[in-house]
Image: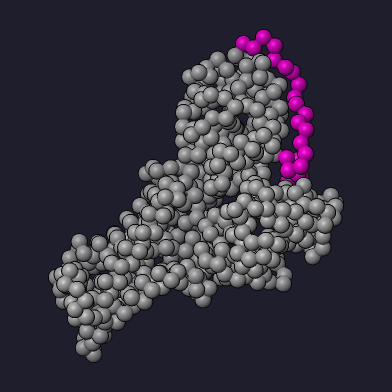
């Protein structure tokens, strides 16, 4: 229920966002007609179409986005025709006879004195919904990510519909107020025809703004209204009121690391948490033929949800690998479920290479469609589920840590299964490089996404231009956990792509380690870079992917360790300059 309220309030806030401006003329074109028969059908069309398209885009992959682009252009043509009939109905009649009938019907449907037609209003609403591209603030970003993880189900669609309903509520208020204003104008100065033409001109201006990308570009820069902070406050306020566990805030779906760690303790008697869900949703299995829950009866099973660019997942792997090796002959089966967060993690070749690099030899299910993820009702990376020999889940743990408790659970379940001799003692996992866990009390910088869908602490906030190559100039000073771009970048929903040499990213952080998920250009050629810490070469503070002089190169899509401080942890300013264009930057993580 709280999620629905949060989504609705996030939608209401779009009325003060710049991206709503090109849509307003389409809504005001219904002024002067009964709200229930004209305005309401239009707003319903907007909300339903947006919720449907957003759901499909979140769960359907790139093909849906591509198809929707054609739909947007058709909608632009349709709405432009509508605006033309309002502005110059006589000219529309002269253009071509097939358009006359359509133009006349649209003109009659929009006319203040014509009989209202709910069907025509709904159709205009559908076209508006296709064109509507809301500013991706924190709430919408979380909803779209949650939709991708949960799949095509009623829950994410309802949340997106609640968001669209909130925006429709704001538009309804604007429509009702605008109707009174336009009606007063008609009565006072008899300017009905001029009002009609003005609306037509405004609609054509809105079409031009959307076609040129101004709704997500220039408008975002010139707007003095920013809803990001308000939305983030709503997330924090409602997160504190929402329940924990499997029904936790969807915001937790997008957060990885110690902040979401659950301090589960292994009790003396392990409870039965449910049956081991099916494992038949994987698109492919690595290191093993497909495994099923039924075939695993008689074995103790550890299911590890991970993704290969997740630093928290990487830091748990030394323990998971050691358990798989130590208890394999005593009846333990470890299964990794690779559920991707970024698009490049869907590439099985990338996963296979990552498994080889980190030495994973146990079975791994490629869960690109999140079917296994949803079967477990999982919400976290990493997540460990422990099942007994009867196929019942007896224990789980989210995040890093509590390795001793988890290993004792394995030993207890093996004894319950009748293992002749269960190895005593606890492993002493050997970890190095990115897998070496830090002292989390020293880490004061959070995971930070570079794509605009979930970007936070970017400064200056109003200069971030979505889906368009733009020039950036970072400020001379940054506060802790603020970051910025320099040079030419195209910032997409998931990543930012450098468009020219000498493009850079700066971040003010406090942690032992700084990592950045990066990928080379589409041609696969290495992208050279130079790292500076407080304006100097890192020296002894360089990460495993950087030389002491700060030089390095991006050769594949993965997590890169760029800073590993050897002394005391203090606030530092990190800068990375890419000497070649085309690099993709996804997310910062710290340790």
Q: Residue furthest bottom?
A: 189
Question: Which residue is at a point 54% across and 42% down the rendered structure image?
Answer: 346
Magenta range is 418-443
From the viewer's perspective, tell me whether residue 118 is left or right of residue 13.
left
Q: Residue furthest top?
A: 420
Does the stretch in magenta take in 204? no
Question: Which residue is at a point 32% across and 63% down the rendered structure image?
Answer: 74
Q: Which is the main secondary structure of the residues drawn in magenta?
A: loop
Question: Which residue is at a point 36% across and 72% down the rendered structure image?
Answer: 207
Q: Residue 123 location in percent, x, y? A: 25, 62
Q: Nearer the viewer, residue 343 or 404?
A: 343
From the viewer's perspective, tell me whether residue 436 is left or right of residue 306.
right
Identify the image quadrant of residue 463.
bottom right
From the viewer's perspective, tell me whether residue 423 is left or right of residue 279.
right
> Is residue 386 among the parts visible in the rendering?
no
Q: Nearer the viewer, residue 532 or 129?
A: 532
Q: Residue 486 location in percent, x, y? A: 66, 68
Question: Which residue is at a point 72% across and 72% down the rendered structure image?
Answer: 476
Identify the image quadrant of residue 425.
top right
Q: Residue 418 location in percent, x, y? A: 62, 11
> Is residue 266 among the parts visible in the rendering?
yes
Q: Residue 551 location in percent, x, y? A: 77, 56
As drawn, 586 above or below 499 = above
Does the stretch in magenta take in 441? yes
Q: Residue furthest left?
A: 115
């Amino acid at each position: 229920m709280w999620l629905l309220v949060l989504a609705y309030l996030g939608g209401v806030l779009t009325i003060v966002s710049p991206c709503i401006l090109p849509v307003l003329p389409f809504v005001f074109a219904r002024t002067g007609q009964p709200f229930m028969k004209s305005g309401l059908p239009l707003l319903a069309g907007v909300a339903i179409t947006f919720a449907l398209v957003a759901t499909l885009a979140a769960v359907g992959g790139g093909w849906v986005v591509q198809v929707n682009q054609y739909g947007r252009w058709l909608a632009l043509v349709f709405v432009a025709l509508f605006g033309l009939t309002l502005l110059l109905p006589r000219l529309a009649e002269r253009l071509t006879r097939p358009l006359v009938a359509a133009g006349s019907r649209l003109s009659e449907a929009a006319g203040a004195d014509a009989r209202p037609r709910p069907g025509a209003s709904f159709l205009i609403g559908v076209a508006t919904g296709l064109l509507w591209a809301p500013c991706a603030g924190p709430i919408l970003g979380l909803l779209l990510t949650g939709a991708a993880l949960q799949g095509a189900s009623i829950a994410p669609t309802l949340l997106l519909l609640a968001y669209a309903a909130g925006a429709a509520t704001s538009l309804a208020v604007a429509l009702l107020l605008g109707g009174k204003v336009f009606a007063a104008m008609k009565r006072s100065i008899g300017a009905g025809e001029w009002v009609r033409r003005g609306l037509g001109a405004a609609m054509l201006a809105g079409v031009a703004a959307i076609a040129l990308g101004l709704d997500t570009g220039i408008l975002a820069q010139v707007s003095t209204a920013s809803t990001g902070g308000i939305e983030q406050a709503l997330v924090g306020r409602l997160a504190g009121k929402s329940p924990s566990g499997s029904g936790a805030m969807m915001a937790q779906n997008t957060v990885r690391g110690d902040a979401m760690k659950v301090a589960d303790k292994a009790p003396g008697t392990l409870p039965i948490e449910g049956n081991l869900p099916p494992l038949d949703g994987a698109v492919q299995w690595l290191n093993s033929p497909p495994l099923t829950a039924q075939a695993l009866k008689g074995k103790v099973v550890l299911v590890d949800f991970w993704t290969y660019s997740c630093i928290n997942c990487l830091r748990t792997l030394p323990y998971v690998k050691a358990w798989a090796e130590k208890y394999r002959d005593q009846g333990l089966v470890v299964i990794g479920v690779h559920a991707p967060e970024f698009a490049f993690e869907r590439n099985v070749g990338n996963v296979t290479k990552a498994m080889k690099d980190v030495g994973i030899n146990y079975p791994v299910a490629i869960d690109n469609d999140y079917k296994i993820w949803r079967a477990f009702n999982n919400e976290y990376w990493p997540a460990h589920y422990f099942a007994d020999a009867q196929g019942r889940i007896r224990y789980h743990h989210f995040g890093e840590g509590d390795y001793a408790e988890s290993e004792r659970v394995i030993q207890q379940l093996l004894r319950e299964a009748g293992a002749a001799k269960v190895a005593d003692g606890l492993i002493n996992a050997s970890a190095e490089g990115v897998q070496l866990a830090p002292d989390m009390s020293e880490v004061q910088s959070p995971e930070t996404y570079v794509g605009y869908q979930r970007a936070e602490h970017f400064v200056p906030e109003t200069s971030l231009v979505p889906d368009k190559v733009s020039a950036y100039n970072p400020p001379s000073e940054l506060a802790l956990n603020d970051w910025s771009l320099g040079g030419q970048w195209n910032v997409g929903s998931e990543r930012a792509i450098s468009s020219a040499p000498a493009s850079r990213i700066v971040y003010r952080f406090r942690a032992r380690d700084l990592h950045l998920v990066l990928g080379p250009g589409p041609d696969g050629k290495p992208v050279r870079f130079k790292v500076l810490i407080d304006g100097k070469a890192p020296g002894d503070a360089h990460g495993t992917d950087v030389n002491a002089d700060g030089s390095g190169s991006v050769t594949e899509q993965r997590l890169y360790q760029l800073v590993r401080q050897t002394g005391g942890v203090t606030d530092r300013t990190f800068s990375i300059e890419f000497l070649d264009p085309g690099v993709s930057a996804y997310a910062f993580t710290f340790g």
